[in-house]
Amino acid sequence: MTSRVGIVVFPGTNCELDVASAVEQLAGSARLLWHAEADLAGSDAIVIPGGFAHGDYLRTGAIARFSPVMDVIAEFAAAGGPVVGICNGFQVLTEAGLLPGALQKNAGLKFLCETVDVRVETTATVLTGEAERGAVLRIPINHFEGNYVCDPATLDRLRAHDQVVLRYVRNPNGSLDDIAGIANEAGNVVGLMPHPERASDALLGSDDGVVLLRSLLVAAASAQPSSGAAVARGG
Amino acid sequence: MAFEARIEITHRPGILDPQGANVERTLPALGYENVRDVRVGKSIRLVVDAPDTDAARAQVDEMCHRLLANPVIEAYHVELTELPATNGSGAP
């Protein structure tokens, strides 16, 4: 059965079609979910893509977290459904309290748009199930507020429960403990600053993001209550 | 009763303030070498209708906690002023 990936669109979101294209390239089905509708339209997995939700007014992700769709996403996540926030989506997930910590301005006070190396630190998440621990992936980043921060107790918990998903090989933005992505304790909610959908084809300079998106489709397929079918794999 | 709230939001101690640090590095270039502890935050002003000061303060606190500030990285300070009972809009 094809994995159905719901991609949330806020006013100001701008990466939804890139994510949809990458999902369809991997034989998943993509549907766009308008933020004002409290309806996930039968999705097996949710992606909150990058952009500038609500103009990033007040703080990145601060207004978006109160959109009606976020309530049903919180319920979906609590029931074990796979939820991934990319870049601005990561910021939304932290503001919504679905992931701990926060993302502050880059230490160098520069908007960063470059391809970086990130290391897979755990495979116990919906985004890295098909990856190998220790693998280094080349994936673009594109952000001003990607500098992850949390209090020491939270960082201890993240480390103790294997919730650091990706680390930068060379820290570009001052992020605490080189963190590029984290998960909740159950591993079904993941936020990351790099854009795997922009590394979904060698023509784009890298296809290292494919293994992450494929992991999500596999997780989505296994999260389907009555489905034992493996998801079709591309790439 | 109407109250004007002036809310000052700053980075919590220990949280990087790259804008403040940048301004602090820039001021000496203009000859102001005796300036330190520069912090850049934001200011929000609003008017709230409430039965009394305590209720107004409690509501502003709640709004700060839920939306206006992110307690993980930001601290806030509220100055509350009762507005004269005129048209209730608080507009100057």
Image (cartoon, grey):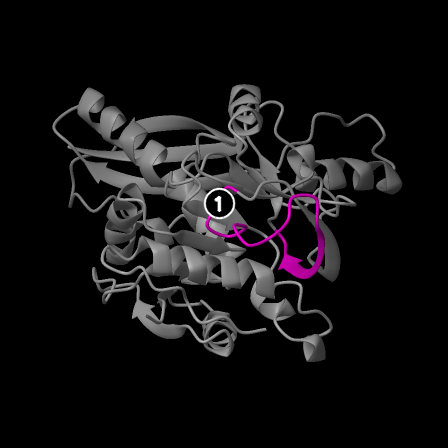
Above or below, A188 relative to B56: below
Q: Is residue A88 magenta?
A: no
- Residue at (42, 72) in percent of width and height: A28
Q: Is residue B84 visible?
A: yes
Q: Is residue A125 magenta?
A: yes
- Decide if residue A60 is in sight here: no
In front of the other: A44 or B37: A44
The span shown in magenta is A124-144
Residue designated by label 1: A125
Q: Which residue is rendered at x = 44% and y = 36% of the image?
A: B70
Q: Secondary structure at mark 1?
A: loop
The x and y percentages for residue A188 are: 40, 45
Screen quadrant of the N terminus of chain A: bottom left
**Chain of the residue where label 1 is placed in the rendered structure:** A
User: Left or right of A159: which side holds A66?
Assistant: left
Q: Quadrant of residue A111?
A: bottom right
- Asked whether, in this view, residue A178 is left or right of residue A154, the answer is right
**Residue for point 75% across, 48% down:** A172
Residue occupying the point 70% across, 76% down = A202
Of residues A132 and A184, the one drawn nearer to the viewer in this rendering: A132
Q: Is residue A38 left or right of residue A31?
A: left
Q: Name the chief secondary structure element in magenta.
A: loop
User: In x, y percent, where is residue A34?
Assistant: 30, 68
Percent across and percent down for residue A134 are 70, 44
Q: In x, y percent, where is residue A196?
A: 59, 62
* The C terminus of chain A: image quadrant: bottom right
Q: How many marks?
A: 1
- Say what amino acid the circle numbered 1 marks: Thr
Q: Quadrant of residue B3?
A: top left
Asked whether, in this view, residue A221 is left or right of residue A56, the answer is left
Judge by depth and name the residue closer to the eye, A127 or B6.
A127
